[in-house]
Image (spheres, helix red, strand yellow):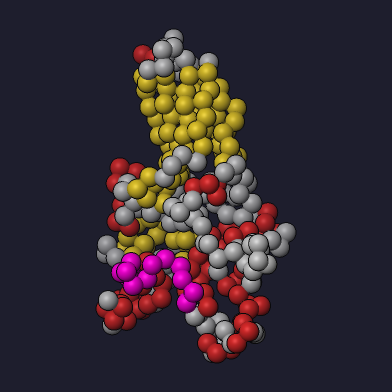
Amino acid sequence: MKEKFENDLMLNTMMGVSMCYACHGKRATNEGVNCETCHGTTLPGKSIEETHAKKYEPGLADLKKPDFCPKCHEMNNPISGSAIMSVYSEWRKSDAGKKGITCQECHMGKSGNGLSYHGFDSGVRDIGIYKDDLAVKEIKLDFPRISLLLENRVTGHAIPASCGTRLLVMELSFRDVNGKEIYTLAETFTKKTELMANLMPYKVLKNSQLQSGEKRRLVFQLPLTLRGQVSEVIITLRFYEVPDEYSGDLKWANWASEPILRQTARF
């Protein structure tokens, strides 16, 4: 399977084998992040022997720098120049980046044995990592409008921290006095991209990610037929995944996480 990518001129020229194969190779061959993903990567200007010599020196110091991370977590289309994935750039502009708090300090903190944590958790594996990172406040119903404030408390990057295949969705379920659902709304936060020849993300069409530290005021309009009926709203935040070709489009979701947050407001 890997030979297919190595011999594909389009993929190799546009994105490079390592970038494409990491996501598009067979899962049986490349199951997520393994040792070689980081420790088998050659640092600029160094051989693999220098990068990961015995006793992890001298490459260990470089592996601890945030500049090591954009190899996978930053992707610009070489033709359009569009920032398809910009987690590293988001970190540089964030409060964490300005304070010198590295990616590794948050995501690979010291475990009980004094070694760096190598779990590489994500919302797919453990939705609990986002506990307290998102907040919904100031929920107000001024019929027919309902408004609220959504806050991203992550100090280092946007949410969702990915491209258009990962969506953060806010679901609002409006209930009457008996608890019966009478209306629903959904708001999507993602980086919607356009594919080039159905092959690779070409450019960003719309970016609605919640940036690090951002507080966004959202206002929704309810149908006039609901006047006097809305007793409460249940707000749920969760992640969805969609295929590459349906970037940012919730109706093509093929996976949904457990709720990150579920909150009820009564009126």
**Residue drawn at x 55%, y 69% as measured from the top left:** 69
Q: Position of residue 259 (x, y in %)?
A: 46, 39
Q: Position of residue 251 (x, y in %)?
A: 30, 42
Q: Nearer the viewer, residue 23 or 228?
A: 23
Residues shaded magenta: 24-36
Q: Is residue 141 magenta?
A: no
Tell me which secondary structure the magenta stretch mostly adopts: loop
Q: Is residue 167 left or right of residue 197?
A: right
Name the image quarter holding the N terminus.
bottom left
Examine the rendered structure and indicate whether residue 46 appears above or below residue 80.
Answer: below
Q: Position of residue 185 (x, y in %)?
A: 39, 30
**Residue drawn at x 31%, y 48% as measured from the top left:** 254
**Residue drawn at x 41%, y 76% as measured from the top left:** 18
Residue 187, image quadrant: top left
Determine if residue 146 is in view.
yes
Examine the rendered structure and indicate whether residue 48 appears above or below residue 31.
Answer: below
Residue 226, image quadrant: top left
